[in-house]
Amino acid sequence: MISSNVKKVKRISEKTLMVAIDIGKIKHTGYCRCPEGNEVKPFDFFNNGRGFQKLWDCICQTKRIHALDEVVVGFESTGPYAEPLLHFLRSKGVRLLQVNPMHTKRLKELQGNSPGKTDHKDPKVIADIIELGHALTVIIPEGTAAELRRLTQARERSVQRRTVLFNQLQDLVFLIFPEFLQVMKDVKIKSSQYILKSCPTPEAIMERGVDGLTGVLQKVSRGKLGRDRAESLYHAAEESVGIKEGQQGIVFEIKECISCIEACDRFIATLEQEMCDHLREIPYSGYILSIKGIGKIIAAGLIGEVGDFRRFHTLAEIVKHAGLDLFEISSGKRKGRRHISKRGRPLLRKLLFFASINTVRRGGVMEGEYQRYIQRGMPRTKALIAIARKLLKIIFALVRNGSEFVRDYAKIRYQPQEAA
């Protein structure tokens, strides 16, 4: 979905036309409101070129009749259905605003004291939120940043698809050869996949024999697995309790799963190469890569999800954009615990979490900070999230200042200089 800057919009001026749109898959619902209260009743328009032009004609006519200078268009955060319309409106020079769906849900009951939801009611509620000044400005990634966002999202979908295939493969193997998983441990390793593709049944394992299995395992694993593992696999095949009925159909599906996994691996590798190529076009990517533990894939993903670090003005904005801003629920004598809001971009949080894992390892740049959190009694997951917040702030500062990461910068900076 389109990225949003968390900076709230000030109240609408007296020369601004407010346009609210309820986004749909087939058609949208538009609504126009003038500062003095005049309005154009909600109307439907299709999600195509003619529909977009119908909306724009209505906007231009209303703007001309009421002698207004500016147009702001607000919409709810939705899936991909809004993106063609937003790119169309951006080309027209209007200001785009985004509204939190939770705000719409809570405010709509004030209209008629009813929780009812209709396509013609929602745009009016969106306009009310904009008028109150609770909308957020929108950042649409452009150029290389837009490419990185699409590539990052495609990679994430491919990884999820591969995970589903691994789970499916494990279930199928358990049916005909449950002992295989006790010997080889994991179907994700190449050696396991090769064995399953060439001899997926206990009978096929025994036909290979110990010597044949040893040669295959040594070759595929590059010497990591040898005769001991081959003997264990052979004896497991001899004593297997896997089902025999319908075995051939399961074998066909196992081979198809492995082929799909291999295709996913190739596609992910291609995506990662494209991400690395585009990353070189980002002028400030070197500042992010200067942090040991943040590799090219994570750096490319972070830039794609943020859009452009230079468009954010404060730390609070970018932390909230990631959904890593803190909140607590306290009342009276009860003091609530602080949690992250999770109202930002989930993939951005995931990338930062993986980056935090890399940086807290032994010798990592955040190992000391992480250990201090642990010694204070903080759970490990919570400590990693705290490191993720800190990493995001460091990245923002590096890009803002145009500098590379220096470990123990505070100690170096404030170290007293020796007398001449």
Image (cartoon, helix red, strand yellow):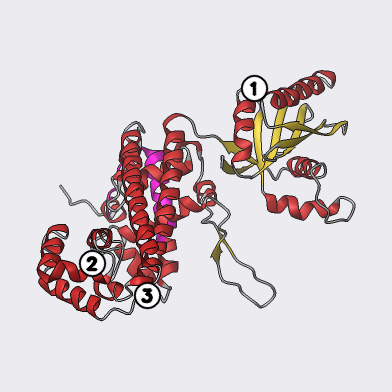
Q: Which residue is mark 3?
A: 243
Residue at position x 45%, y 49% in the image: 157
Query: What label does residue 92 carry, if any?
Result: 1
User: Which residue lies under the disc numbered 2?
Assistant: 204
Q: Residues within 10 Å of mark 2 (few under 14, many from 20)?
A: some
Is there CB contact under 8 Å for labels 3 and 2?
A: no
Which is nearer the N-term, disc 2 or disc 1? Answer: 1
Magenta span: chief secondary structure: helix
- 300 versus 96 height, above or below: below
Note whether 400 is above or below 223 in the view shown. Answer: above
User: How much space separates mark 3 and mark 1, taking CA atoms?
Assistant: 65 Å
Q: Quadrant of residue 189?
A: bottom left
The answer to whether residue 125 is visible is yes
- How far apart are labels 3 and 2 at the CA level? 14 Å
Q: Nearer the viewer, mark 2 or mark 1?
A: 2
Q: Amino acid at mark 2?
A: Ala
Residue 149 versus residue 380: which sits nearer the camera? Answer: 149
